Image: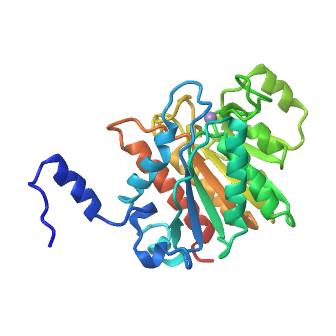
Amino acid sequence: MRQLPAPRSKEYMAERVCYQNPWNFLGLPEEAADAARARGRLLPIPYEGTTSYGAGTREGPAAIVAASRQVELYDTEFGCEPAMEYGIHTLAAMDPLYRSPEAMIGAIEEAVAEILLGEPRPEVLGILGGEHSISAGAVRAAARAYKNAPLVAVHVDAHADMREEYEGSPYSHACAARRIVEICPVFQIGIRNISSGEAAFLKDRTDVRTVYSDEANDPKASYFEELSDFVKGKNVFFTVDLDGLDPSIMPAVGTPEPGGLSWERMLAIARTVCARAAAVPVFDVVELAPVPGLRAPDFLAAKLVYKIFSYILAGK
Ligand SMILES: [Mn+2]
C-alpha cells in the first residue's frame, strides 16, 4: 500500500487529484473511454499562435479536461449517464507548431483527417481549443473525409471572423469563419463585433447567414426554423467560440463582449443543430483562456462539450 503524504501538504493535494477518477474527459472508466469501443473521440489542440488581446487559450484544453472530471455523468435531460453508453476516448493533445499559422493549420487538417478516416472511424470528433484559427484545419478535414455528402457550418461567436487576413496572416483567429466559408456555407449566431470590411463582405453573400446578437437573444427565437432548415439532411461542422456566450457566464475569453448568449440559448442551438443534421462528424469548442482561481467558465465549457456529445450520440 502506498502511503499518502501528510494531509494539507501540497504533495497531499497533488496525490489526491491523482487518486480521483482517470485523467480523461469526464474521468470516464476504462470501459467507456476505450478507443476500440467509444463512439466519440476528443482531441485537445492547445494552440495559441495569433491571439491579439487576452492570452491564455493554450491552457484551455487542459482546464476543460480538468473541470470535466468534476462534471456529473448523470444528465437530468437524458435521465441517464449518456457518456457511459456511447463512450468518449480522449486522445493525446496535439503538439502545437509555431513555425507559422499556416503550418499549424495544415498539420491540424492532416491530424483530423487521419482520425476521421481511421479505424475504427469515430461517429463524432470533438476538438478542444486553443484559439479559433484551428477550425480552418478541422473544416477542411471534414470536407475531405465526408466528401460525398453536403457539409455546412454552424458558428457561434461574438465576432464574425470574416476578415480576409489579420495582422498579416489569413490563418489568424480573426479569420476563422472566412476560411470556413471557403469550404462550405456558414450560419453564424451571436455576432456583435464586426469590422466595416467584414460588414461589406457579408452584404451580398448568399452562403452566410449572420444572426446578430439582438436577434440571437430574441425570446421568440424566430431564427430557429431557419437554422433547422439550414442543417437538415446535411453534415454539420459545429464551431463554438465561447465568447459567443455572455461574459457574465463566460468571462474567461480573450475578448469578452457584452450582450452574448445565455447558457439555455446556447443549449437550444446545440440541441437543434444535432437533432436536425444528418450528422455532426466534427465540432469544436474554442477560445477558453482560463482565469486562475475562477472555475465556473472551465466547468461551463466542459459541460457544454459533454452536452454536445450527448445531443449527437445519446439515444441513437
Ligand atoms: Mn470570437
Most extreme residue toward the front is 99
**In x, y percent, where is residue 316?**
63, 77
Q: Is residue 279 visible?
A: yes
- Residue nearer the viewer, 90 or 288: 90
| Residue extending farthest left | 6
Residue closer to the observer: 66 or 231: 66
The answer to whether 283 is drawn above or below residue 50 in the figure is below
- Judge left or right: residue 1 versus residue 233: left
Q: Position of residue 186 (x, y in %)?
A: 79, 46
**Above or below — where is 41 with respect to 191?**
below
Which quadrant holds residue 159?
Answer: top right
- Residue visible at 52% across and 69% down in the picture: 88
Q: Is residue 6 left or right of residue 254?
A: left
Instruction: List x then y, in percent, for residue 250.
Output: 48, 39
Q: Please tell me which residue is depicted at 38% across the width and 60% down the height of the picture.
A: 69
Whether residue 222 is visible to the viewer of this picture, yes or no, is: no
Colouring convention used in this rendered image of the protein? rainbow
Number of marks in picture:
0
User: What residue lies at 47% left-to-right and 55% top-to-bottom?
Assistant: 303
| Image-quarter location of ligand 1 | top right
* Point 59% across, 77% down: residue: 315
- Percent of width and height locating residue 115: 66, 64
Would residue 74 be found to the left or right of residue 89 on screen? left
Instruction: Give the position of the N terminus as an image quadrant.
Output: bottom left
